[in-house]
Amino acid sequence: MRLRILILGYGEMGHALEYLLAGKHEIHVWSRSATTTLEEEAATAQVILFCLPVSAHLEIARRIAPHLTDDCLCLSIAKGLDESGLTAAQVFARVLTDQHRYGVIYGPMISEEIRMGRYAFADVALNEQGDYKIVSSLFHGGKLICKPVSDMQGSSWSVILKNVYAIMFGVSDELKLGDNMRGHLMVTAMSELSGIVKSFGGAANTPYSYAGLVDLLTTATSENSHHHELGRKLASGRFSDISGEGVHTLRMVDKYRLFDSHSYPLFTLISSIVSAPVTLKTEVEAYLQQIRTW
């Protein structure tokens, strides 16, 4: 089935999805420099791909909502929080009415690898499960392997928080704490992710998925990962440009008390390291002393 696709945002992932879909569907790309209006493009789209930071979702969703057709499906790939501490799914739920269709696509989807023709993998969570047939048609025959899941809240928090935990893998590698420590970090991160997801009403096993475990493995072990590299920078005393979705997530969790972060020692360690990197080695040693008593 050939679909009319509107891609919002033309950064790395916008380019990557255009590469995936070109030739199979009718592709339209909108950015703020476009000559056509957003509303005009949205009015005729069958699928709208939000390849934008979550911070832009609320404004965009409000602008297009009155113009969407009943069969239009809005999908976000944004793995972060907006300035109010909302996920992309929460923004959609707040702005779009029950008659609108929306969802999120989360998993290991490194844009450079997609453009190289390599495989990528994602969980797809939708507010109307019957719309998975549209997603299946969207990526049919391509190298983005999608799997339907029902826990949109759990998938969202799994993929958002994996950026936070990936920072610690970079710290560990820079400090040469070894492969055994990597194993500890992975099992602890997954345990904490399960607890946090449950606190938001999600299922405890949701993090064991493309959006959680698989994306964490990818982000935490890839030398091309921004958050892994950020951890290395912090551990080597390079404190300029401490940025990224994981850093923003830490700030939003602290600002809005989105969950009881002090119940999760590894998350607390990473938060302390990012907010006061000069004490990094002291904080890591204190954490290692703490886990000896577990």
Image (spheres, helix red, strand yellow):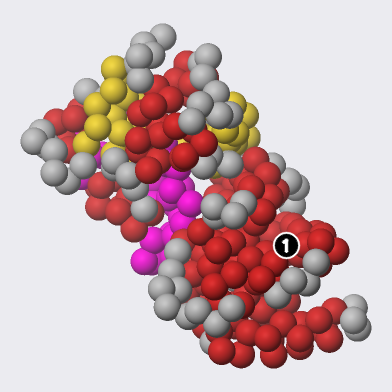
Q: Is residue 155 visible?
A: yes
Tag 1 residue: 189
Residue 10 on image: x %, y %: 29, 41
Under circle 1, the secondary element is: helix
287 or 89, nearer to the observer? 287
Pick the front one: 141 or 86 = 141
Percent of width and height locating residue 98? 39, 37
* Nearer-the-camera pick, 87 or 246: 246
Where on the picture, by quarter, is residue 30?
top left
What is the residue that sits farthest to the left in this orientation?
Answer: 35
Which of the 4 image quarters holds residue 237? bottom right
Percent coordinates x, y for residue 272 in the rendering? 60, 83
Examine the rendered structure and indicate whether residue 133 appears above or below residue 244. above
Q: Is residue 151 left or right of residue 48?
A: right
Residue 196 is one of the magenta-drawn residues:
no
Over which residues does the magenta segment extend? 63-92
- Relative to residue 161, is residue 17 depicted above or below? above
Residue type marked 1: Ala
